Amino acid sequence: MVKLTPIFIVTLVLTLLLSGCSWFTGSKNIDMTPFSDNAGTLFGEAAKISRPFKWKHLKPYTNIPEFQRLRVRGEPILRALGGIVYYSHQVVAINNSSLKDKEKNKQLAGYLSDVMQKATDKGRLDSLGLDRQSLKQVLDNILKAETYLDAIGEAGPIVNSVVLFVQNRLDELQVDIQAVIVSLDRIIETEYAGKRANFMGLKASQERSMHTVTVIYDMMMGHQEVLDTLLQMDKSLNQFFPSSSTYNISQLEAAERYLRDRLKHIDIMIQQLAYDASEYHAKQDEMENWRINVDERIKIARNAMTVWAQSHRNLGAGIPVPPLIDVAGFATGLVGTAVNKVVP
């Protein structure tokens, strides 16, 4: 399966929208196969939104209510995407059949009705922004169309409604994604709050102790005026300096040994908490990677809907849809070829 980058999808959109080239010469005898192939490839990529993320550190957290709601919200989108691919292939199959145009129109109306049912929330038309009267009018127009191509054009209102439905559901999905992020972050922070506080406290104590050792080295070099500063920095050193005005080298060495011993114990405790700190950061990183991954999938789905809707409009208007998605030739520079086709 070709990996569609955002730049490539934008190229597809631009190529479909720009109609000044020879690709877009109006015709009533157009090849519909590229439309079907494009739809299948585009929505094959968009369907990646359904692929489970490979959790490693946060898998135990995926049963939270926010995740469950996200999964439920995603189901209508997947049904709609599947229905659109099904409908797109049927559009081509009907065109290639030996049926009369009126019979083709009847078949088209039936398949389009199936797509609509797949896209709706439990069959509710209002979730598509339609009412039964509007739906009946569109289907009647399809059935009354003089040619099959005209019937495809008459399907526009339903197609637009399905596209709008999917885009709206994707908007809702992004809200749910943010809710998952907030909930996961809260759970992780709560779980590691005590350990993080201990870790940060130890690091701060380590830094202070190391600075205090540096001050003792200065005192060994003859900077007597820093004794008051030293005792203010670490009151536990008072035991080594009975007088705050005088000291000797033996007192400084004893204080240094004491601090170095304390630093060793701090280092041991930090090492014991290092695994927890690493695990905390790994969970935070995985949460961010999941967010980026899902956002990218939603972008692909959005762009796929845009390209498919424009392809369908062009098809109904008798404008050939260029076979932009060439799986076999992608590795040999398809993007450059597509860009060249934008400019006649």
Image: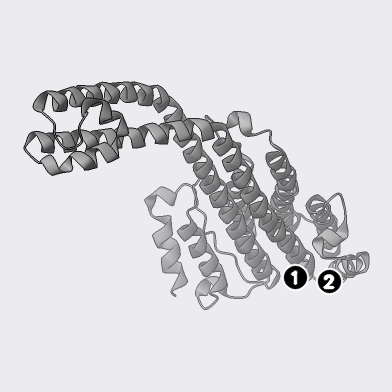
Looking at the picture, does residue 332 appear above or below residue 209? below
Q: What residue is pinned by disc 1?
A: 153
Going by the numbered disc 1, the residue's amino acid type is: Gly
Point out residue 286 in the picture as x, y percentages from the top left corner.
Answer: 50, 38
Going by the numbered disc 2, the residue's amino acid type is Ala
Q: Which residue is nearer to you in this view: 98 or 317?
A: 317
Residue in view at x 72 percent, y 49 percent: 86
Residue sitting farthest toward the left: 221
Q: Quadrant of residue 186?
A: top right
Place of residue 329 in the rendered image (x, y in percent of width and height, measured from the top left):
44, 50
| Residue position for label 2 | 145
Q: Residue furthest bottom?
A: 20
Whole-number angstrom distance, CA of label 2 to CA of label 1 = 9 Å
Quadrant in which residue 75 is drawn = top right
Give whichever of discs 2 and 1 has the lower sequence position.
Answer: 2
Cβ–Cβ under 8 Å for marks 2 and 1: yes
Along the viewing direction, whichever of 99 and 20 lies nearer the viewer: 20
Query: According to the image, what is the colour scheme of the structure?
Result: one colour
Q: How many marks?
A: 2
**Where does the C terminus fall, quadrant-wise?**
bottom left
- Crowd rating for badge 1 (residues with CA inside 10 Å; few <14, some 14–19, many 20+): many
Q: Residue 35: x, y in percent? A: 62, 59
Residue lying at 57% horizontally and 54% vertically, measured from the top left: 300
Give left or right: position of 277 versus 252: right
Q: Is residue 103 visible?
A: no
Judge the density around disc 2: few (<14), some (14-19), many (≥20) Cα neighbours within 10 Å. Answer: some
